[in-house]
Image (cartoon, rainbow, N blue to C red):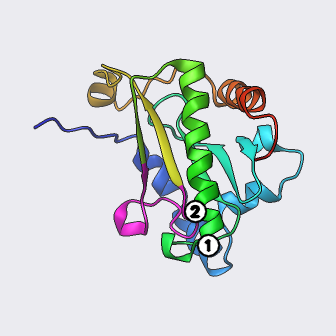
Amino acid sequence: MDILWSPWRSKYIQSFKDETHKNESENRCIFCDALEQDGKDKEMLIVTRRDKCFVILNKYPYNGGHIMVAPNRHISSLEELEDDEIFALIKTIKKSIKVLEHISKPHGFNIGVNQGRVAGAGIPGHIHFHIVPRWNGDTSFMPVVSDTKIVSQSLEETQEIISKTFKELFPANE
């Protein structure tokens, strides 16, 4: 059995412990905060805004190009989604895959949702889909030996490239 693990993610989860409990009680989260920052998409790592959902970079990526697609509405479970939101999310996931394929030609993708803290959700109050581009051999010895993950591009550069490609491939907010 092969085991894929990512110890660097624990820093991400731990970074939200105090803030998450405070924000959950106020029905707030990093996704909602980012959405409210009009004109600051680059700083907030938002790639594209859509009518019902948006795409944002993961600040602690498993791989370069790791993005998340989330509804604009602050909800914690798939059951709470309206049908039009489900359609918009799946359509945006499909477009996101096309954008990432256009940019970096990955060999595959991990696409998924962690619903609830016990399932691994770092931000359990706001449901979101992860899209992680994968390449053959993309896990090296570095995370295992030295607790270090190599990501070859800055988040700012990644945001700019993915955002630009979204606009080129999908000019209208569909």
Which is nearer the eye, 81 or 77?
Answer: 81
Q: Position of residue 71 (x, y in %)?
A: 65, 61
In the rendered image, residue 126 lying in the magenta stretch gets the answer yes
Residue picked out by circle 2: 86
Q: Amino acid at mark 1?
A: Glu
Residue farthest toward the left in the current orientation of the protein = 1
Q: Position of residue 128 (x, y in %)?
A: 54, 57
What is the quadrant of the N terminus in the image? top left
- Magenta segment, principal secondary structure? loop
Q: At 40% across and 49% down in the image, what residue appears?
A: 10
Q: Position of residue 112 (x, y in %)?
A: 42, 51
Crowd rating for badge 2 (residues with CA inside 10 Å; few <14, some 14–19, many 20+): some
Crowd rating for badge 1 (residues with CA inside 10 Å; few <14, some 14–19, many 20+): few
* Residues rendered magenta in the picture: 112-128
Is 48 rendered above or below residue 33? above
Q: Secondary structure at mark 2?
A: helix
Q: Position of residue 35 (x, y in %)?
A: 77, 56
Q: At 71% across and 32% down in the image, what residue appears?
A: 166
Is 21 rendered above or below residue 166? below
Q: At 35% across and 32% down in the image, what residue appears?
A: 147
Whole-angstrom CA distance, mark 1 to mark 2, is 6 Å
Is 145 rendered above or below residue 112? above
Q: At 54% across and 35% down in the image, what residue appears?
A: 97
- Residue 95: give its label: none
Q: Secondary structure at mark 1?
A: loop
Q: Are marks 1 and 2 in contact (CB under 8 Å)?
A: yes
Residue picked out by circle 1: 82
Residue farthest toward the bottom in the current orientation of the protein = 25
